[in-house]
Image (cartoon, helix red, strand yellow):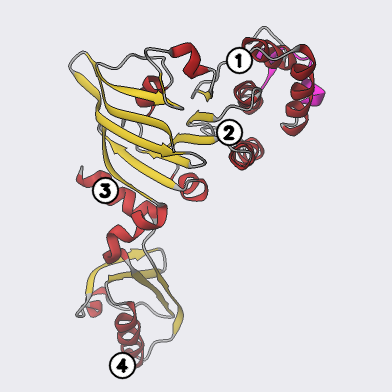
Amino acid sequence: MEIIKADHLSKLFGPVKAVDDVSISVKEGEIFGFLGPNGAGKTTTIRMLTGVLTPDSGSAQICGIDIHTNPLEAKMNMGVIPENGTVYSDLTAEQNILWTAKFYGMDSISRKERADELLRHLGLTERRNDIVRTFSKGMRQRVSIACAIIHSPPVLFLDEPTGGLDVYSRRLVIDTVRIMNGKGSTVLITTHNIEEANELCTTISIINKGSIIATGSPEKLKKTFDTAKYVEIAFEQPVKKELFVHEGISRVETHGDKMRLYTDDPDKAVKYLAALAEQQQVKILSIATSNPTLEEAFVQLTAGA
């Protein structure tokens, strides 16, 4: 079942086409990653999906409800964590959470129980009565997360949720996403952090210059560029780069004290390097092979778009 659906969304800001004919489909229970460089159109798309912006063309549905014709009903099914947070600086952490819960129609007992649970989980119990303006960015983001998930929404949107956070706060965000997903929430997360997308997402769409250029599982996207396989080797003594010319080796790069040889046949390359070391009478200190990474696929896709 499609929980989040966008059909041919487009948005212009003056002469700039920020989003150009974007369509996505997120199935129930997925963690869907929207991956792209800064300025690619991720946040604009999220704002149209959540009803903050009206598209110039196209439509969006949340749980089968059109976000632009029935915005209130659609928004009751979602939690949103925008890039810059939504908390009120002049309220305490607890007041922010309880106030948000009231908007979602939760009764006073449920509000209090759920707020206590989230404050405890997000490490905010001791700061529950402190004004949010005194909080660090990481702590503000934790309050923002608590507000977004207070009503256990079936759909959760996160826009660059870990940008600029300390390690502890980032880990809490990631763990909370997994917990919510485990409890049934479908998650759409935008990020330019490739490691984060690879770690979290079941499906990824790569967006660049306002258009989606690839969609698939992280592993499928990695395999898009099999020629990115390489062998990395370090010798005890320097070996001239010119000696690495061999059938199947497409290019050679220096990485610190190692040489990286890109090849579509790592087995043949390793055997050639062993023979080369014997011929040159040099000792191999280390040798390793690597398959394509999501980062390499991302770089090649966005560079060509």
Marks 2, 1: nearer the viewer: 1
**Picture coordinates of residue 285 (x, y %)?**
47, 80
- Residue of label 3: 301
Q: Which residues are magenta?
A: 124-135
Q: Marks 1/3: CA distance?
A: 36 Å
Q: CB atoms at circles 2 and 1 under 8 Å apart?
A: no
Residue type, mark 1 in image: Val
Marks 4, 2: nearer the viewer: 2
Near-viewer residue (2 or 75): 2
- Residue of label 1: 87
Mark 4: few, some, or many residues within 10 Å (few <14, many ≥20)? Answer: few
- Residue of label 4: 279
Counting residues from the start of the chain, the first of labels 4 and 2 encountered is 2
Residue type, mark 3 in image: Leu
Q: Describe the element under mark 4 as helix, strand or loop.
A: helix
Looking at the figure, which quarter contains the N terminus? top left
Q: CB atoms at circles 4 and 2 under 8 Å apart?
A: no
Query: Left or right: 87 with respect to 119?
Result: left
Near-viewer residue (77 or 168): 77
At 46% across and 48% down in the image, what residue appears?
202
Q: Marks 2/3: CA distance?
A: 28 Å
Asked if the stretch drawn in magenta spans residue 132, the answer is yes
Residue type, mark 2 in image: Leu
Query: Left or right: 128 with respect to 85?
Result: right
Marks 1, 4: nearer the viewer: 1
Q: Describe the element under mark 2 as helix, strand or loop.
A: loop
Mark 2: few, some, or many residues within 10 Å (few <14, many ≥20)? Answer: some
At 82% across and 24% down in the image, what residue appears?
126
Mark 1: few, some, or many residues within 10 Å (few <14, many ≥20)? Answer: many
